[in-house]
Image: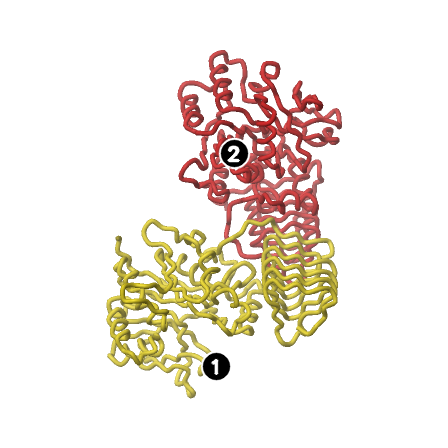
Amino acid sequence: MAKKNMIALILAGGQGSRLSPMTKVMAKPAVHFGGKYRIIDFALSNCSNSGIDTVGILTQFKPQALNAHIGIGTPWDLDRVHGGVAMLPPYMSEQGGDWYKGTANAVFQNLSFCDQYDPEYLLILSGDHIYKMDYREMLKQHVANDAAATIAVINVPLEEASRFGIMNTDGNGHILEFEEKPAHPKSTLASMGIYIFTYKKLKEYLIKDAEDPDSSYDFGKNIIPAMLANNETMVAHEFKGYWKDVGTIQSFWEANMDLLSTDNEVKLFDTSWKLFTQVKIRPSQYIGTNAVISDSIITEGCIVDGEVRHSILFPGCRVDKNARIVDSIIMEDCVIEGNVIVNKAIILEGSVVKASNVIGNGEKIAVIEAGTVLEPNFSGKI
Amino acid sequence: MSKEYMAIFNLDEDESDIKALTAKRTIASIPIGSRFRVIDFMLSNVVNAGVTNVGIFTETNSRSLVDHVGDGKAWDLNRKNDGLFLFTHRLLDIANFESKMLQNNMEYLFRSRSEFVILTSSYFVCNLDVREVMKSHEASGADVTVVYTHTDRADRDFINCFTLEVDTEHMNVTGVGKNIGFIPKADICMEFFILKKSLLISLIQENARNRRYNDFYELVFGKLNALNFNAFKFDGYVACINSKSSYFKANMDMLSMDVSNELFRSQRPVYTKIKDEPPTIYVDGCEVSNSLVADGNIIRGKVKNSIIGRFVVVEEGAVVENSIILQNVRISAGAHLYGAIIDKNVVISENAEYKGDEYFPTVVEKRNMYLP
């Protein structure tokens, strides 16, 4: 098969338990985001826009929604003759089979997939981050430094630095030290979980790591420290732009709300770096005579005749006359009937809130599970 | 059943009353309903009946059509066997239908394995259950089935369409004429026919020899006495997009929930090309009411009773009323539109005014991307 310069693997096996109940039926990368997308669309669109035509997606936890979403990769132009997209779940072999025991182990188990393309470089991505990034810039830096590994980093506020893996670098961007969630951070450059490895080098380390029964088989805990200990050339690629790990309900809500200004940092409207997704064809949104809308994102198939402020409506939602939605995220095909107040809530797909209900109190984020039907005047505490 | 059918779209449609919108495209590829194109409706109707072999015959000016239908993927027509076939010359211009053209087109007809042919134009916007027409045709045993609709507004709508005289007892077609807008009540031919492929071939061959007719409709209706015509009455919403005013009205009709539910929210969806636009942002201070809005828009101004296409920016203080805005348009601050159709890629400058009405909407024509 044709040799590829760089291929990508997206780690999409995470459960995302802190995002429950959104992750009740799907892996975190498949969670809906931003009106018409799923979280993994960011990494996939970045690959597509960066000219990467071979992408493996490592899945493990509840992959059905992800499989259905990605299909043969057509929306991301990844339905290719050579390469394209491949779903890579754990598998059985003559020696038996294992679940993916860690990020490094997941890649180790798929070395044969990578070998088919004989790549010079391997790009490892996380499937649950919100950002737009040109991986070609990162590769340029990697090649120029003849590095074994290049790690994308972002400057975070000092008070938050101890939540991240922190890179301590010299003046030239070479990584001297890596500390996972340090109590007293020496720098504010946080790892974004985006790595470019020189493939041959990485393969050596992965094989050695797999032989160590005490390893956690993790990039951050094992592979990166081992490479540093061996004085490999490790480079930090500083990313300046919007990046968010939507790990919790709070950060998920915030990242969605970040989209609600026209100059939002994710640049949804930047047509030179489009976000692609699987689209179900629906008619345009209909805005009725009683609608009052401000600071909101609304998309195809919605019928809005109520009040929507500072909120996001996913495809096919209906908001009836005299309903009021504030600071909320309403996912696909929900119905919000009249005399309903939704104040700072996330209502998951297919839910119906019948007339005269109040959801959310404007403080703590209320979450309504998918497919919930709230009878009229339910007015229980949600 | 549907494997037995192929569909041929004849895009040789009369553009004389809608020229402002067809200078750079066919009627079939005029954007309509904020995110669709005219042909999407009939193409989806045919596909929703399980037809997988569709030939589109167009004459010239087909760049935008070819760009729109592509390989047919949006309609599930990118098939290994059958699928979508585009012919950029007319099938039905029978007067010039000689030697090579005849051979090429006949080759397509002969090679298709279908027993029946659906022949249709693109410009009737409706959600037609084509399976019902197929059933009616097969049950009737007729040579040709024609779909028609009854209207009480023929003095305003369906101008220049064929009218049919229908014997409603036997559902036979007994005569054909043209709607010149004098009489309100009429049975309008929806230019949707079913006939056996072998019959179509023999009609074309016969005409190639004696050259009596100039187009397909003349050819078929010329056989009104010789063949048995079954009439299929369609009772749903239908509009014919053959003039500026009918285009304007059809768009406005889609603001009605009844029409939009019938067209878009039935078991038979309308498919169209995907453009990967972000959702629409409604900025603080915007005022939108009774409007159909596509994705990819930034709305800061006032929009009322209007149809807004994709990638449209309505700036602060701009007012868009009773208007149709096509793709990639910017309405600058303070501009005021009423009864206007703004075609693609246009920038309406600050404080500009365009006014028209439903019979004579003001059209700002499509701008080429390469012009400054």
Left or right: where A138 falls relative to B70:
left
Mark number for residue A272? Answer: none
Left or right? Give the position of B9 relative to A285. Answer: left
Image coordinates for residue B305, horizontal then vertical, percent: 70, 48
Up the image or down, A91 lies above or below B218; here it is: below
> Dot 1 corresponds to which residue?
A160
Residue A1: x and y, percent? 26, 53
**Residue located at (59% from left, 43% from top):** B268
Which residue is disc 2 drawn over? B1
Q: Amino acid at mark 2?
A: Met
**Could you say which chain is coloured yellow in the image?**
A
Image vertical order of residue B250 relative to residue A44, above or below? above
Q: Residues within 10 Å of mark 1 (few under 14, many from 20)?
A: few
Letter of the chain shown red in the rendering? B
**Chain assignment, label 2:** B
Q: In this view of the protein, can residue B29 be seen by the observer? A: no
Q: Position of residue B284 (x, y in %)?
A: 65, 63
Give the chain letter at badge 1: A
Residue at 27%, 58% in the rendered image? A116
